[in-house]
Image: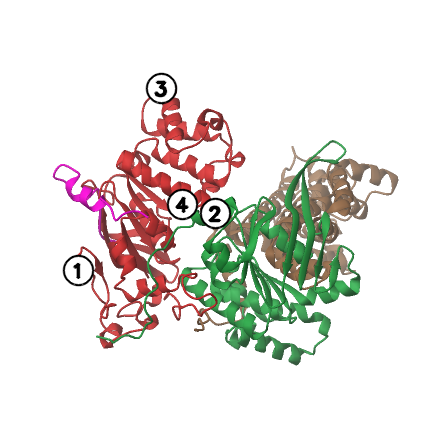
Amino acid sequence: MSVEQVVHVPSGHEPARRLREALTLLFANKLASIGALLAAAFVVVGVAGSVIVLVPGLDHLYTDQNLRAALLPPLAPDHVLGTDHLGRDLAWRVVTGSGISLMFGVAVTAISMAIGMVVGSIAGYYGGIADRLLSGAIDFTWGFPVILLAVVLGGMLSPGLLVVGIAVASVTWAGFARMIRAEAISLHEKEFVEAARALGVSGPRIIVRHLLPNMLGSTLVLGTYYVAAAIIVEASLSFIGLGAQPPMPSLGQLIATGRNFLSVDPWVAVVPGTAMALIVLGLNTFGDGLRDVFDPRLRRW
Amino acid sequence: MVTPTTGRDLATVGGPGRGPLLEISHLSVRLRMRSGPITVVDDVSLEIGSGEILGLVGESGCGKSMTALAIMRLLPEAAEIAGGSVLLDGEDLVRTKPERMRQIRGAEVAMVFQEPMTSLDPAFTVGHQVVEAVRAHEKVSRAVSLRRAEESFERVGIPKPRERFDAYPHQLSGGLCQRVMLAMALVTSPRLLIADEPTTALDVTIQAQILELIKQLRTELNLSVLWISHDFGVVSEIADRVAVMYAGEIVEIGETSHMLGAPRHRYTRALIDSIPGRGEPRSLLRTIPGQVPDPGARPAGCRFSPRCDAPVSECELIHPELRAERDASSFRCHNPVA
Amino acid sequence: MLVELRGLGKRFPVARDILRRPTRWLLAVDDVNLDVHRGETLGLIGESGCGKSTLARLILALVPSTSGSAVVDGIRFPGASREEMRRFRRRVQIIFQDPFGSLDPRMKVEEIITEGLSHERLRRAERRERAKRLLELVELPVTALGRYPHEFSGGQRQRISIARALAPRPILIVADEPVSALDVSVQGTILNLLVTLQRELSLTCIFISHDISVVRHVADRIAVMHLGQIVEIGDSAEILRRPLHPYTQALLSSVPRFNYAPLPPRGEART
């Protein structure tokens, strides 16, 4: 009897090789590369902004007023992107706003992803009565209008990022849960899961060792879309005054402020608006690229 | 059993002063890979007479499906025909215009695949799909195409064709879906049918029916068939002649009964020997050591030499040519089975 | 008797009313009585949808039965206790058809084949030692340990599946079409391996296949399944020579006959 030889593969640490391959694939797609660059720029700017928000003593960057230099257009000396009606530097305000958007988007998405993973994988893997109850909860939640919830919560409690975050997360977890439930159901049919059951591996262990690692890719893809969506919701709510409270400058609030000066000096609204558009565009195209990497069926050559 | 049949004679006697219906010569297909091009079909030559069934046998990755797709010019985007010609009744399909190729596909050469369920569009009724196949090639009225489709359903033995017309693919069994595929392939009366493992996904009782049907259609319509399979049992039942592929090239070709009864190439023989269920139960089956070489790393001499049980000195060095025998068979081996 | 099935049945709801009460059922396995002796190989043949895979999953207690009972290695289903269930999971293992879907693509071979050993609380070195011995058993090089399934060919993956199934030292192996997805030449190596292992480890084997020539090669006895029921069972050579049930007759006559005699042994004079 013969032993087949192990297929020859390029040597190298496997996860590292896979990451290299994934990056090659991602950057082979031009649109996705642009998305990835925009997303990376957003992360860099956002982290800087987060530092400004979180480190005490840096708030002067975006709060310092100078009424004699109000409503300067972009490329003014000392103010690359101009100033607002109180003479505050728009560049710093946009950086800070991006920081708030990044922190908000990532935190809310991470929380909803965690809840969604637990609920979705339990419903999908165990099925039966657990699935029926959890699916009911998911469907009920998913139908709920986020904005309305935030308005109600904001009215009952006090408006602010925390309230908006709770409102968004308490709806979007259902989006993750729906997708993860569907993935868990299809993985449950896979023979390697059946083999694990035949080996006596417990349910929770199967979920952790087999299901979650195999749906990580699609979950992360969905995550990038949800970060973008959360940022938009936050901006909309800030725009109507329910989100970040002044003097903290979230992007939505910056646009709202700018709205008052549209006829005098459109830059005040255009600058944060453009930043916002680039962020969302970047995240979405980056997500599309990621999806192609994780799901070769959708790949086009 | 099929009696070793008339296909050959038809090929030579059949057409008025013409050669075989399909004549592939020196066909090569290259696959563009990131690491450089690799040759997946290498200098393949074969011919199919009208009314003949040629079995193309080989293991996965040997290039048999790529050969079929190359004939149809339906190769995946990363693949290209690197050389050779495919003459259908004298017309070179490799060089013909895409426009003309679209006419030929379906009208003169039709193809059925392994998975009938996924080859049919789930969003339309099967009747609609067959009617569409008619109207794609001929300017006929709806009524005429309907009647043609119905005839085709009847011809492939679909019971109650009228009722099945309005069924969606998922409402039919795998065997029925494969019959629908055949009906669709045959509705335009093609002269050549390329069947890529059409019964592999089916149960044996259904497979037996389909094999019977193909043989019958061959007789009735004088249909030529290129039957691709990995299963010698199926091929021995249906094919007049058999070609065996290994690592991108044809290693042996000949009449079914001759070749399967007395294979000359060592690979053909090893494959036949490894079929289970013919020796003592639980005796060790003969196997072929090693595995098919990567297309990028084929041995310089005979491609089968590293796995062969009777190599001689030239095997490693000299790539054997196809050697023709008196009985119209040929093989590619320095040390053939006696 | 290692396996005793008495009136075993499994039905699935295929339609429900508005209150989700089932209104129509599919009888996948219908009143099956079957005994499997210790040490034998029972071949289970039938066409797609005949219920052979559901029967396999019933024997493995991967799905609960809806009627009848099964006694496997002295453990009775339904009604096994937790303790019995734990023992059962080590004693009965399965090998699947699809060499691509049956291994978790995100796990290394070492993790895959030692997954069934977690109850033994082995130290890392001991686990690795066991994994190496298992690879030896299925004739794979130890370098396979640190690799991922996609790096292997179909036949090699099937060897990994076999190693995983053998890890907890089972006495009963249910092989569900273990060679159907493989090329003919690879099929032979896996069948040889299974036959050898079965003899060396004195395993009992339930071998499910639609391929009659494969079953003829490995099985002592053959059971023929049709529409959820076992329509004929008996000595393998006997059934193939003189099938009694009309369905078995139809099935056997549909098998493409490869009528060419086996060739004489190799090794004749070289030219």
Specify the colour of chain C: green
Q: Residue at x 68, y 71 (%)?
A: C117
Q: Earlier in the sequence, mark 3 or mark 4?
A: 3
- Of the residues shown, which amino acid type is indicated by label 2? Gln
Horizontally, residue A213 falls left or right of residue B50, namely right
The residue wearing badge 4 is B198
Q: Which residues are magenta?
A: B1-27
Secondary structure category for the residue under label 2:
helix
The residue wearing badge 2 is C249
Secondary structure category for the residue under label 4:
loop
Q: Nearer the viewer, mark 3 or mark 2?
A: 2
Q: Give how far apart the Cα atoms at labels 4 and 1 are.
A: 31 Å
Quarter of the image with the C terminus of chain B in it: bottom left
The residue wearing badge 3 is B141
Question: Is residue A64 something one can see in this rendering?
Answer: no
- Of the residues shown, which amino acid type is indicated by label 1? Glu
Q: Nearer the viewer, residue B181 or C122?
A: B181
Q: Nearer the viewer, residue B145 or C88?
A: C88
Q: Give how far apart the Cα atoms at labels 1 and 3 are.
A: 52 Å
Q: Which chain contains the residue that carries disc 3?
A: B
Question: Residue B261 location in percent, x, y?
Answer: 28, 59
Q: Give how far apart the Cα atoms at labels 2 and 1 are.
A: 41 Å
Residues behind callouts 3 and 4 on a single chain = yes
Q: Nearer the viewer, mark 2 or mark 4?
A: 2
